[in-house]
Image (spheres, coloured by chain):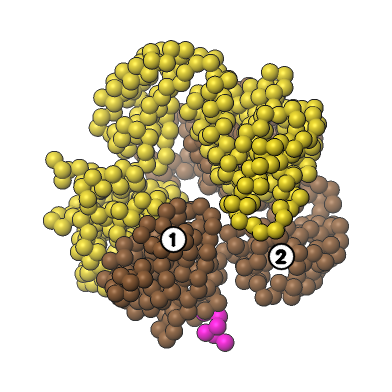
Chain colours: A yellow, B brown
Amino acid sequence: MKKVNASVITIGDEILIGQIIDTNSVFIAQELNKIGIWMNRKVSVGDDKESIFSALSEEEKHSDIILITGGLGPTADDITKPLLCEYFGGKLIVNEEVLAHVKYLFEHVYRRTGPILQTNLKQAEVPDVCKVLLNKAGTAPGMLFEKNGKIFISMPGVPNEMKYLITNEVIPYLLKNVLTETIAHKTLVTFGLGESMLAERIKDFESSLPEHIKLAYLPNYGLVRLRLTGVSSDKEKIQKEIDDLFSILKTQVADIMIADEDVSMETIIGRLLNERKQVLSTAESCTGGYIAHLLTANAKSSSFFTGSVVCYDKRIKVELLDVDADLIEKEGTVNEEVSRQLATGIVKNMNTDYGIAVTGLMGPDKGEETEEVGTVWIAVADKQKVESKRFMFKFDRRRNIETTAINALNMLRLFILSNSR
Amino acid sequence: MKKVNASVITIGDEILIGQIIDTNSVFIAQELNKIGIWMNRKVSVGDDKESIFSALSEEEKHSDIILITGGLGPTADDITKPLLCEYFGGKLIVNEEVLAHVKYLFEHVYRRTGPILQTNLKQAEVPDVCKVLLNKAGTAPGMLFEKNGKIFISMPGVPNEMKYLITNEVIPYLLKNVLTETIAHKTLVTFGLGESMLAERIKDFESSLPEHIKLAYLPNYGLVRLRLTGVSSDKEKIQKEIDDLFSILKTQVADIMIADEDVSMETIIGRLLNERKQVLSTAESCTGGYIAHLLTANAKSSSFFTGSVVCYDKRIKVELLDVDADLIEKEGTVNEEVSRQLATGIVKNMNTDYGIAVTGLMGPDKGEETEEVGTVWIAVADKQKVESKRFMFKFDRRRNIETTAINALNMLRLFILSNSR
């Protein structure tokens, strides 16, 4: 398995002053990883000639492929493109295909009236030594250069434009021209066992894998994704090998596997509910609306998610969700019975098939409650019954909230499945 | 103003495979920026000796200060510390202060019973050529090295431990030993004018600034922070200069300034409500609980935030928030009157002083609604009156939700202030 390395260079002062979080390189890393290219280094540099030049020449030494994002907006154009011309030796020429595309965007998509500005037309100028990658998501094209046997690809930093180019131009190009072998992979998602415990359980399987097949652990808030990746010149053979090994892996993690493909917990919940034509509501105290936010981050959730009562104040628990006021008076809000009453209350008051309820102490302080910080009670209910469970999370407030949310969704998943048996 | 440059090296495969988003370097960039140190380059490399070595020697050429995070966990220890010993020339010795701290943590904080594991005790071993920076947030200490006139500081990658060291050890050390001059700065927050329009408005002010005083624009979802930073060997003089210029800047942005210090919109809302001993609730359709999540991300919000009804389904708008069912039948859910009824409904049903309501189409699809994707109606209400306003956002779903939230909070801010006049 010949290892192909890539460096990513992100250009722009906004990353270096901590103004934006660099999510572009996360996307690029994931997409490269899928086709078996290893992101070797990631470098962020400022918007000046010296920094960009030194980054290009250094990364050329480290990697086979150098992907560059940013520094291509209409205002930054003046620096970056002449600089690329200089680095790769060439001159700026108008690319007719890009020019037609820019004109089309302004006339038919942006629907600007009046003449197109010179700065916008300049986006159609490219170094004559590059291969143009047409950017259908915007005006600035991608540009591919070759030098000393290395491939350099420059893309705009606007996330959706970069994503368009990576998906539709860069990955297909690399698959065709750089990776002479076929990549096959399959992913499953587990929940409930930490990465190191999981590794311990499947260590024999992992060590038995042939050299050309790799197992990756991708943990994220209690979920651990396992991905098998194989590389071979024989497409059918490698796919069959991966399929066979994936079957073995599945049997070894059957009890903790929540999906045999790469999907999120929210998607799994959505599918279970859509299949049953059932709907869900949530009663959120300590998560403060985060579960609802997670679910509604996907527009399609309207088919299975009705809504939430964020009952941050104990008065709301009583008034909108019918929790016993005396119970709260005597026992506080973080206990099993309150979680159960919240769950049955939301099912009743939102008239849904299922309800999730959470009440707990996310820290850093515990206010007037007696329980320890990190204590969470989660309950799930349908119209007949309710189940509840105590958790203890010892992270910071943000991660406690996120971990509570994913555990609550998993409890609902198990509850729905046990109903179907 | 002597420019001091820093490089940040983050060590760990998890960044390179796109498993985690690197927020550590965002925090470091912001903290360095505050004391006038420019983050020159940010480099992520894998967990292997060759990668770390080449990163150290390259960044030493680029910057005065090299900050290193990650690669110090109990399992990775075996690689990183001997490697630092080799790079800086030294040998591992037990540091008694760190050893006492590790023992204290295990006995009194983590409350482990039984003997402490050898791997944990090894955290007290440090290269004898480093200055130890005691990490009170965890077991792995920070380590400071000097070589060829450059300063290297190695920290664990766990966010709260890294933050502890940056705030309590690294920044004070740099202020005392590296920056010979005093840094003074003042920040204000504006809302409602884009960065380029704002720059146009205050361009005369900006160009009149003396060489040793800089103005930074820090935009974030409709908010733009303006920060004046001055550097001088005369502490009192520079503070007065900054104060005087800050007063002038404030008069130029008086109409759009929402705070004359560096605070979030949620904090401003919290202060306004706490001062008045008033409470808020939200009725969220298109934001799906995101406003509640924003507010409850801070534990202190319980003093002014009661809760939310996330009314994703139109049925919940009618049943829990008293929106007229005929109105929805005839006009759909995205219109002015629905937003107003949601706002008055949440104020009444949660019995709060103020209510925020949002209804809109966040995209990518618009479902059965007739309005254009991106249309949002926001309403704010108290017990006497209600105000509503239409917005149009053309970002992706995630950013539409975030921008709606910040605009809704700003509408409430203006509403509260107009009540106080």
State the residue at coordinates (33%, 72%). Answer: B330
So how many labels did they put on this image? 2
Disc 1: which residue = B361
Does any portion of residue A311 appear in the rendered image? no
Amino acid under label 2?
Leu
Task: Tell me if B285 is positioned left or right of A121 in this view.
Answer: left
How far from the left and from the top, in percent, is residue B35?
A: 72, 53
Residue found 63% across the figure and 42% down from its top? A101
Instruction: Determine the chain carrying the residue at label 1.
Output: B
Mark 2 lies on a secondary structure that is: helix
Bin the neighbour count of mark 1 within 10 Å (Cα to Cα): few under 14, some 14-19, many 20 and up. many
Report if residue A164 is visible in the image: yes
Residue A340 falls left or right of residue B116: left
Q: Along the polypeptide, which appears first: circle 1 or circle 2? A: 2
Residues in magenta, as a range: B416-421
- Residues A393 and B94: in front is A393
Q: CA distance from mark 1 to mark 2?
A: 29 Å
Q: Position of residue B174 (x, y in %)?
A: 73, 47
Q: Residue at x 50, y 73 (%)?
A: B389
Mark 2 sits on what residue?
A: B198
Please identify the dominant SS of the magenta region: helix
From the viewer's perspective, is A255 left or right of A57? left
Amino acid type indicated by mark 1: Leu
Q: Nearer the viewer, residue B53 or A267?
A: A267
- Please state the horizontal and vertical placement of residue B377, each as a whole percent of the image: 46, 69
Q: Is residue B3 magenta?
A: no
Horizontal relation, residue A296 to residue B398: left or right: left
